[in-house]
Amino acid sequence: MQTQPQKHFSTCTLCEAMCGIEVTTQGRDILSIAGDKMNPFSEGHVCPKAAAMKDLYDDPQRLRQPVRKTENGFEPISWDEALDTVANTLHKIQTEHGKDAVGVYLGNPNAHNMGSILFGPYFYRALNTHNRYSATSVDQLPHHIVSRQMFGHQLQIPIGDIDHTDYFMIIGGNPLASNGSIMTVPHIKRRLKGIQKRGGKVVVIDPKKSETADISCDHHFIKPGSDVLLLLAMLHTLFAKDLVNVGELIEHAPDLLKVEQFVKAYPAVRVANRVGISADNIEIMVSEFCSAKSAFCYGRMGASVQTFGTLTQYLIMLFNMLSGNFNRPGGMMFTQPAADTLPHSGRGTMGKYASRVRKLPAFAGEYPVAALCEEITTPGEGQIKAMVIGGGNPVLTTTNGKQLDNAFSQLDFVVAVDFYVTETSRHADIILPPVTALERDHYDVVFHNFAVRNSAKFSPALFSQEADTKTDWQIYLGLAERMDKLNGKATEHYATLWQKEPTGVVDDMLKSGRYSKGEHQLSIQTLLEHPHGIDLGPLQSELPEAIYHPDKKINMAFDYFMGDLPRVEQHFFSDASPLDARSANTLDLIGRRHLKSNNSWLHNSPRMMKGLNSNEQGQNPRCSAQIHPDDAQRFNIQNGQFIRVTSRVGQVDIVAELTEKIMPGVISIPHGWGHNKAGSNWTLAEQHSGVSVNDLTDEMCVDELSGNAVLNGVPVTIEPL
Ligand SMILES: Nc1nc2c(c(=O)[nH]1)N[C@H]1C(S)=C(S)[C@@H](COP(=O)(O)OP(=O)(O)OC[C@H]3O[C@@H](n4cnc5c(=O)[nH]c(N)nc54)[C@H](O)[C@@H]3O)O[C@H]1N2
Ligand SMILES: Nc1nc2c(c(=O)[nH]1)N[C@H]1C(S)=C(S)[C@@H](COP(=O)(O)OP(=O)(O)OC[C@H]3O[C@@H](n4cnc5c(=O)[nH]c(N)nc54)[C@H](O)[C@@H]3O)O[C@H]1N2
Ligand code: SF4
Ligand SMILES: [Mo]
């Protein structure tokens, strides 16, 4: 008998926007996915990617059973055999070579997966290795360090109150394509228009006139990697033009006004040439910002993942504070999540140890991923012999991916927790495939913390779990229990965890959280009774409660951050400036995102690839090298022509796209492409392979303060083919 179609109200977990979705199922089939109009947070908004959740579920190439590598390719094995083999092999390698011989890399999808977040740590603790890495250090590491230093907790990141602001300055973010980042904000377009409708302003500072810049009031081109100078000059202007307005904040940040002495050397006229924005325009921007009723300045990927990303994010925070736009409506505010993970998670240990070969600093128990390759290939005590790769594709997503690709093939043992055979997991001896997002319970334990409005929503799994399938948390807990047993550790507590499940942990957090009493009485049960989610109101002013330092004061940490200023001087203004040493033919490489791609892993989705005309080499218009017509003329390049792009570490041949939206001297190539490596199982993705921009990015080039990667402002040369 055919079952009746059923409606579920769930959540899209592909990006940070947390859109509510209405999923229609029949039996175990997903019939359709649409925006949930009754969701109080996203109000029906979805982007085209939501439909990819269905393709992902249906994809016949998605692994549904563990596989082991044999001479004849990957062959299915049972879960017990797979988990036993992984645990025994990792234990054997650690016994022979020491704990650090096993490395771990965790990718971006883990952040959208409460099971990995809450139960993955049992496994990493059982491994007890220093060699931990993640996508954080090709992304938001600067934000965590700024929050750790200033507010005492790596996850206590202030968020722009976009719905009440009158001036939104975006430095290096393109939310129209990304749907926002470290700013969970569905319906971004409507919200940006909302600011303008109420007479406010949206200003974009970006080496590309991005989709976001197209619908904003002002756009300024900026030379890639020079944002630090812009911010120093903006702060200088605040003091020089008497625009500082600290108000009550001074009680919570007693050293705030001491910033003046550090920015004295940076009047707008001094930096204008290096930044590419005139001194007048910098000063006008600052005075407009300060005359708005409320305002905030927000910096993302373009500002974070570059030579001075950490210092830049710190200066952005100072600018919001000193202009009177911190901890007040319309400015930067702390969030009030219902399931608050902060009291239960590490505040972010820093300065305790450094990587073996290059001495890059560890933060929160992880080394920067720029150090991963050399830790695999450099012999000696502590060398990585085996890797665990959980939901990540570092061969395509981290610097000098080609070199890492080679390093992975030298390892004794690799295990991947992934449902695809990717450019990375093809190196695995065993792949452990979890179920897809809609098949597991979901409560967003990360992105509620970064949302522009407080809300809560629980999305139960669409289906009862099928026999012989596992969620990420079941895989990690299974491995953790086995490893602890092999190491002779106590394992009694696992019985409780298996029974409690991550959902039980979230229930505990809700029941002890700030909305557990009074009007909302939040628990998993209450949320099940409100399947569209519950609105919990706008962001609230919250000082000094939001501060995690014991003295409840905001710490300026001048020694740490401003200690980077000599490097700024050296880089931009010294006789030995590397910028002056560049040849006239050098362009600055930057990245970009497309609405229908998601890092490296939606290119096997028919809905996302529809209509994408690729040639026989898989070159396609979405993975093009955008350059300005003036540069094209200089290098004698026609639109659509193949060009060779070369950096210190490699070269790619790619089709050129001429556009005036790119600043002259800049070249933009998106990441996540390069599905042209033998041995992955993505047939459709291979047809549209593109090339990997991370075969050009340089693992030796990092933001020295944090060790974060430099993905924007990479020097390259180009030539027509
Ligand atoms: N040049 C350049 N490089 C970049 C960037 C850039 O802007 N420019 N951006 C960087 C950023 S911000 C990020 S976050 C990184 C992302 O880098 P990664 O996290 O390394 O890469 P993803 O493409 O997100 O890889 C996700 C993998 O997880 C698998 N997966 C998906 N869902 C699940 C799940 O639920 N469980 C498990 N176990 N696996 C799952 C997918 O099949 C895929 O193989 O890329 C970075 N790289
Ligand atoms: N569709 C889609 N959405 C996504 C993702 C995806 O892959 N596809 N990935 C998700 C992830 S993991 C993340 S972290 C977020 C990232 O979200 P965003 O931070 O919005 O990232 P991008 O869209 O890459 O926008 C970065 C912008 O910075 C500009 N830029 C580059 N270099 C510089 C510079 O030196 N200075 C300045 N001022 N600007 C610069 C680029 O031109 C670009 O417009 O997106 C998330 N959402
Ligand atoms: S914006 Fe798109 S990808 Fe992001 S959560 Fe919403 S539907 Fe999903
Ligand atoms: Mo990211």
Image (cartoon, helix red, strand yellow):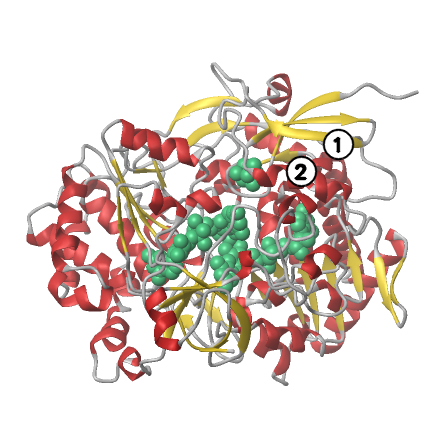
- Which dot marks residue 30? 1
The residue that appears at 24% across and 64% down in the rendered structure is 275
Callout 2 environment at 10 Å: few (<14), some (14 to 19), or many (20+)? many
- Report the number of discs: 2
Q: As displayed, is residue 692 above or below residue 316?
A: below
Instruction: Decide if residue 107 is in sight here.
Output: no
The amino acid pointed to by label 2 is Pro
Instruction: Decide if residue 118 is in sight here.
Output: yes
Q: What secondary structure is marked by label 2?
A: helix
The amino acid pointed to by label 1 is Ile
Q: Position of residue 630 (x, y in %)?
A: 32, 68
Asked which quadrant contains residue 539, the reply is top left
Q: Are marks 1 and 2 in contact (CB under 8 Å)?
A: no
Asked which quadrant contains residue 470, the reply is top right
Q: As displayed, is residue 639 above or below residue 168?
A: below
Asked which quadrant contains residue 687, the reply is bottom right
